[in-house]
Amino acid sequence: MKTRFTTSFVSIMLLLGLTVSFVKVNTNSYQTAFFVIVLLTIIFLSGSSAVLNATALGFASIMPTKYINALMGGQALGGTFASLANILALATLPSVTDSALLYFIIAILVTILTFFGYFYLYKLEFSRYYIFREGSSYIYDVHENDKIINKRQVQSSIWSVFLKIWKWGFAALLTFAVTLSCFPAASSSIQPINDLGWFERFYSPVVNFLVFNVTDLLGRIIAGKTRFLFKPKSSTLFLITALLRLVFIPLIMLCNVQPREHMTVLFDNDYAAGIIIFFLGLSNGFISNTSMMLAPRLVENHEAEQTGTLLSLFVTIGLAVGSCFSVLVIKLV
């Protein structure tokens, strides 16, 4: 686990550093080469992020449930912070390159801080208990001076874990697939119906990105506070709820998404899009976070890390499916 964390963190920091180095560079003389570099950077950055997310969720799954809530809430908080930074940059920084430089520098600093924070966990007695406790993926025989003198692996098959948590996994998959089908590709193309004056420049950053990220965070907070109201066997209810969220796709398509060729605008009101995005974000945060918190409670202690990794795979597939469908949604509008 530590190797995966270290490798992914270092890769992300190096790739972000490479990106920052190009912000102020004039690349007009080698556009093709620059395009290839950017594509490769995105590929490796996405891969490193996927490994980091899967490892982090697996790590959080061996901890008490509230730490999964903290991990998921942190992701939503990051989105909210990025939205606020975007609005602030639009209001204060006239240069797009200055805004981009600021974004990437902040990302690098946060990544470095998180990198050292992870290794600090191994010095805390609380986290060491869950990392080295009997029943985790590895059983450690620890000497009185904390030196590990023996390690015995305890493994369950991925298939046996899958059979226990598949409903929660598909609930998370469907949740993210529906969300990515609508947000941000289609939702960011929603244009205001009325003349909003100076606020028109901020319509998409506020109504689309800020509203979604704030409500997504709110949904995850609510899930954390209400997790005791639901049982791990409530998975069927949440799977059905995730399926019902499919209604958000036509609702977004019927807003004033521009350009459009096939469908007419039904919601010709600037507040309608905000209300739809509000519930899209709220339900996304609530269902996804509840799925992540309750699924590990269906498995044995030594299966917790595998459960977290498997849930991360469900989420990744959901994101990929949603991204592909977002192209179709735009074409159908």
Image: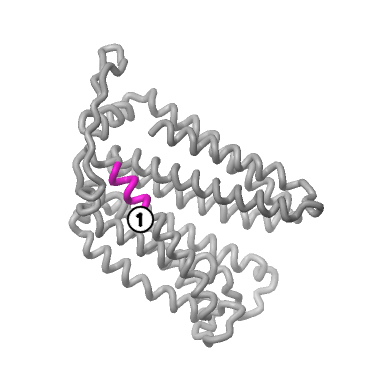
- From what the image shows, is residue 191 above or below residue 101? below
Q: Picture coordinates of residue 95 (x, y %)?
A: 75, 54
Q: Is residue 256 left or right of residue 77?
A: right
Q: Main secondary structure of the magenta part?
A: helix
Name the amino acid, label 1. Phe
Q: Which residue is mark 1?
A: 314
Q: Nearer the viewer, residue 125 or 323?
A: 323
Residue at 35% x, 57% y: name it: 288
Residue 62 painted magenta: no
- From what the image shows, is residue 120 above or below residue 223? above
Q: Residue furthest right?
A: 29
Residue at 49% x, 75% y: name it: 329
Task: Look at the image and tell me in which quarter the N terminus lies.
Answer: top left
Where, by quadrant of the figure, is residue 151 drawn? top left
Q: Nearer the viewer, residue 221 or 19?
A: 19
Task: Tell me which segment is drawn in magenta.
Answer: 306-313
